[in-house]
């Protein structure tokens, strides 16, 4: 209160000040949360197709793996909740890579997915990859 | 009367934070809602460049072949998926730096490929190479 002004005025405001809530600490917290969520938001487009992932003991987190393709048991390729032909994978991957240049590719392959479909997809996006492909697996055990 | 005037002055000097708070809260809620804390986890599979995947270059690396009917072949014999790790570990013991390549024939399933890759990584292989399938 004292920094707001001299004696009498501070006293008269003191009465009103008790009725008001000081919002400054809450604002601080809200801003910090806001910045945190802005920074961490990645806008990942999920393939949105159910996949039975293989189990692997050596499952590691995919570093910045935010461009996600899925290959289901029939060998169909999914991206952003839509089935896509393999010819379109490159253009979609290129667009996603332009949006987030540091993002890496992840492929969710069903255990029954034919490797030929996976191989074709990988061949299509290979020119855009600057890290090994992260093949999504389930932590075993 | 004087008091009211003075209070009016202080109100003018203070900025009304309410509209900003509204905006900030709406932004906060938006970002909380869109934040997807999805953490993908998996194993890394490297596709060697086309020039590297020459089937003729025998660099002495470990080679595992998965046939179209999901059989795993290694050193000219068929092995069980559970034996892959031990076999790779044995080969790796002689030269821990050697590369590892898994080849698939069309018709193999991704599950087998990933199981072999997992076994290799468990055995201590640094990078799993999976060259393009050669057309039969």
Image (tube, rainbow, N blue to C red):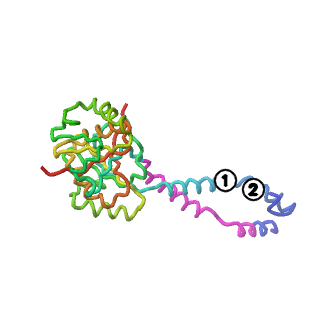
Q: Which residues are magenta?
A: B8-37
Q: Report x, y in % for residue B60.
A: 29, 44
Dot label at residue A64: none
Please identify the quarter of the rendering in which residue A28 is found.
bottom right
Which is more toward the observer, B101 or A109? B101
Q: Is residue B49 above or below residue B12?
A: above
Which is more toward the observer, A100 or B7? A100
In reply to whether residue A108 is colored magenta, the answer given is no
Q: Is residue A64 left or right of residue A85?
A: right
Total label count? Answer: 2
Name the outermost residue toward the left: B136
Q: Is residue B136 left or right of residue A88?
A: left
Q: Residue at x 59, y 57 (%)?
A: A31
Residues indicated by labels 2 and 1 sit on the same polypeptide chain: yes
Chain letter of disc 1 in the image: A
Residue annotated with mark 2: A17
Q: Report x, y in % for residue A63.
A: 43, 50
Tell me if mark 2 has few (under 14), some (14-19) or many (20+) residues whose alpha carbon lies within 10 angstroms of its own.
Answer: few
Label 2: element kind: helix
Secondary structure, magenta segment, majority class: helix
């Amino acid at each position: 209160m004292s920094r707001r002004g001299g004696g009498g005025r501070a006293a008269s405001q003191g009465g009103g000040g008790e009725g008001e809530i000081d919002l400054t600490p809450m604002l601080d917290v809200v801003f910090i949360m806001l910045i945190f969520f802005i920074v961490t938001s990645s806008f990942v487009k999920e393939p949105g197709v159910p996949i039975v992932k293989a189990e692997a003991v050596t499952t590691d987190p995919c570093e910045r793996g935010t461009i996600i393709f899925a290959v289901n048991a029939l060998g169909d390729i999914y991206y952003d909740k839509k089935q896509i032909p393999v010819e379109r994978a490159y253009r979609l991957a290129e667009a996603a890579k332009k949006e987030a240049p540091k993002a890496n590719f992840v492929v969710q392959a069903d255990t029954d997915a034919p490797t030929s479909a996976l191989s074709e997809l990988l061949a299509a996006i290979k020119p855009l990859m600057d890290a090994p492909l992260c093949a999504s697996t389930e932590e075993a055990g | 009367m004087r008091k009211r005037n003075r209070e009016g002055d202080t109100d003018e000097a203070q900025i009304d934070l309410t509209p900003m708070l509204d905006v900030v809260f709406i932004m906060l809620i938006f970002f909380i809602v869109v934040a997807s804390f999805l953490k993908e986890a998996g194993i890394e599979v490297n596709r060697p460049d086309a020039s590297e995947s020459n089937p003729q270059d025998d660099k002495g690396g470990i080679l595992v072949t998965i046939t179209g009917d999901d059989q795993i072949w290694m050193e000219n014999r068929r092995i069980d998926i559970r034996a892959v790790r031990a076999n790779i570990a044995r080969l790796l013991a002689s030269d821990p730096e050697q590369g590892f390549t898994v080849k698939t024939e069309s018709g193999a399933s991704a599950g087998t490929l990933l199981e072999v890759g997992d076994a290799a990584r468990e055995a201590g292989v640094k990078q799993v190479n999976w060259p393009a399938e050669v057309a039969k």
